[in-house]
Image: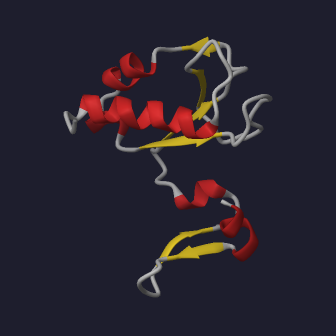
Amino acid sequence: MVQLLQKLSIRATNGPDKLMKVIKGPVTKYLPLQCRRLGFSFSAAKRVAVHDYVAQLDDVATGCVAFVVGAFAHGRIEAPYIDEELNVSEYPLSAAYCISRITNAFEMKWKIV
């Protein structure tokens, strides 16, 4: 992450391909119009079991889902483009662990594991 913020991109070690890059806002111009945008925050009022929430998502009706996860364990995400803000734990989680829980829920739903 430090490299991404300092150099504004991360390249593959074995070629010129860019793996990640910082984009200019607003981020919504890069998302499809009907994309559902979910924010994850410890301070969100709606607490959900992430496996149950992901299981009930309709892949066809939803089309795509974008996740906004803060890079901090405390505080609130200030992103006006979020459609719904969710809390997935009664304890503050690191961003890495929150993303791990989300991806694990999709692995279970799509039977990847």
Q: Quadrant of residue 69?
A: top right
Position of the N terminus, as image quadrant, is: bottom right
**Going by the picture, which residue comes out furthest to the left?**
111
**Going by the picture, which residue comes out furthest to the bottom?**
16
Seen in the picture, residue 15 relative to 20 is either above or below; the reply is: below
Q: Quadrant of residue 94?
A: top right
Q: Residue at x 31, y 23 (%)?
A: 55
Q: Nearer the viewer, residue 22 or 16?
A: 16
Classify residue 65 as left or right of residue 58. right
Q: Quadrant of residue 73?
A: top right
Q: Nearer the viewer, residue 54 or 15?
A: 15
Position of the C terminus, as image quadrant, is: top left
Count of numbered circles on the image: 0
In the rendered image, residue 56, in percent from the top left (x then y), is placed at 33, 20
In the rendered image, residue 9, in percent from the top left (x then y), is placed at 62, 74
Classify residue 53 as left or right of residue 6. left
